[in-house]
């Protein structure tokens, strides 16, 4: 009798612990507490306009970002992103699709298009006028969009819509604007146009567009998850078509990012192998190596340029060094030794 009573107490205790953890998990993933759905809709609609104060803030942000890119200052770029109102119409697009409000979607797209036009015109004008035309590291960083940018934009969009829906954590929105980095790629697009480089302009605009699409997608997903007030589709077929079109569009947008990510991964691998090559095959003569650069030539082959002091590393060592490159799987790569410190390898690149 006592044994049965003890077993029953253990079952009750286990059930209590299980229920406690289930409740804890539910509370952890619950976004609905403190969310003002109608207030969120009104705020996004009222802040997405690219006229008046928002237009001035946008223009100021564009010029400051362009200057930051020009002088290679990350701090200036971050400061400019804090004042940019570009996030609002993107959130507006995701919200409008999420609540099936076509008028709101049209309005958000109009303001989004106006913001893009303003940004490209002003950044192009700046880079056309400025005497500083160096391709800085900050500019180059906005020309290689990858799949990782998709993840940043996706989670940034989730944080963005939550920060607006929950007034108690609204201070996170500036951080979202910095993380997703919407404004700098647009300004780099202006740099590419001003310098007649279609490759720079297209790659940077793709990065901006990729970020924008996935911020909007994350907003859509959160709005649907929180069950915002929703306008019904006229037919079930229309609803299914819209979902299919959206999925196809997102997949098409993602494909180039995977291709670019593959190239970036290959570059990182080659950089790691090159570092091993220098340590192993140049070794103690490293103190005579002023700089080095691995270039890809027009015919697809590569050339490793070594800028050195003196003659401790000279042309007689090239066969030995090229065998080392083969062993490090840096194939189809020749070596050129430049015995001077006067040449800037940035210019050769």
Image (tube, helix red, strand yellow):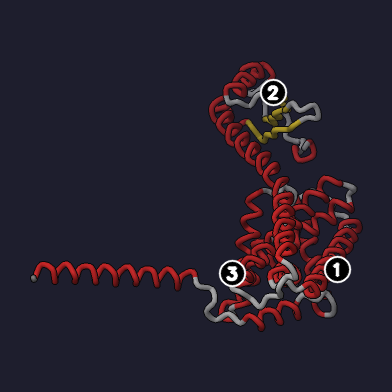
Q: The N terminus lies in which quarter of the figure? A: bottom left
Distance Cα–Cα, label 3 vs label 2: 52 Å
Indicate the secondary structure of the residue bearing disc 2.
loop
Select label 3 or label 2 by which is in front: 3
At 73% across and 67% down in the image, what residue appears? 235
Q: Is residue 135 left or right of residue 215?
A: right
On residue 114, the disc is 1
Label 1: few (<14), some (14–19) or many (≥20) C-alpha neighbours in 10 Å: some
On residue 225, the disc is 3
Residue 287: tell me if it is visible.
no
Label 3: few (<14), some (14–19) or many (≥20) C-alpha neighbours in 10 Å: few
Indicate the secondary structure of the residue bearing disc 3.
helix
Q: The C terminus lies in which quarter of the figure? A: top right
Query: Which of the marked residues, 3 or 2, is nearer the chain's N terminus?
Result: 3
The residue labelled by disc 2 is 332
Residue 184 falls in which quadrant of the image? bottom right
Indicate the secondary structure of the residue bearing disc 1.
helix
Residue 171: tell me if it is visible.
yes
Relative to the observer, which residue lies in front, 312 or 83?
83
Q: Position of residue 103 (x, y in %)?
A: 81, 75
Relative to the observer, which residue lies in front, 181 or 27?
27
Select label 1 or label 3 by which is in front: 3
At 70% across and 65% down in the image, what residue appears? 236
Select label 2 or label 1 by which is in front: 1
Are the residues tagged 3 and 2 within 8 Å (C-beta)? no
Q: Is residue 304 above or below residue 118?
A: above
């Amino acid at each position: 009798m006592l044994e049965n009573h003890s077993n029953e107490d253990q079952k009750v205790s286990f059930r209590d612990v299980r229920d406690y953890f289930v409740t804890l998990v539910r509370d952890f993933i619950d976004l609905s507490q403190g969310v003002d759905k109608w207030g969120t809709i009104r705020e996004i609609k009222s802040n997405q306009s690219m006229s008046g104060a928002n237009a001035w803030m946008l223009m100021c942000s564009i010029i400051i970002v362009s200057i930051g890119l020009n002088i290679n200052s990350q701090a200036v770029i971050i400061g400019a992103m804090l004042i940019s109102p570009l996030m609002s119409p993107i959130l507006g697009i995701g919200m409008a699709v999420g609540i099936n409000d076509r008028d709101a979607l049209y309005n958000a797209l109009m303001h989004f298009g106006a913001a893009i036009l303003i940004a490209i015109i002003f950044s192009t004008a700046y880079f056309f006028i400025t005497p500083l035309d160096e391709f800085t590291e900050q500019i180059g960083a906005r020309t290689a969009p990858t799949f990782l940018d998709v993840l940043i934009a996706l989670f940034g969009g989730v944080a963005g819509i939550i920060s607006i829906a929950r007034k108690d954590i609204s201070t996170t929105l500036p951080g979202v604007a910095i993380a997703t980095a919407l404004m700098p790629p647009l300004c780099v697009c202006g740099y590419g146009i001003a310098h007649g480089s279609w490759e720079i302009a297209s790659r940077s605009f793709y990065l901006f567009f990729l970020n924008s699409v996935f911020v909007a997608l994350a907003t859509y997903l959160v709005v649907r998850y929180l069950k915002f007030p929703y306008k019904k589709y006229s037919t079930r077929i229309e609803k299914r078509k819209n979902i299919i079109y959206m999925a196809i569009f997102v997949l098409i947008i993602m494909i180039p990012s995977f291709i670019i990510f593959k190239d970036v991964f290959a570059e990182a691998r080659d950089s790691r192998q090159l570092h091993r090559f220098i340590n192993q095959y140049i070794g103690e003569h490293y103190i005579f190596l002023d700089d080095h650069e691995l270039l890809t030539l027009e015919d697809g082959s590569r050339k490793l340029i070594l800028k050195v002091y003196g003659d401790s590393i000279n042309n007689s060592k090239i066969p030995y060094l090229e065998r080392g490159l083969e062993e490090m799987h840096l194939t189809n790569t020749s070596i050129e030794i430049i015995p001077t410190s006067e040449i800037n390898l940035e210019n050769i690149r």
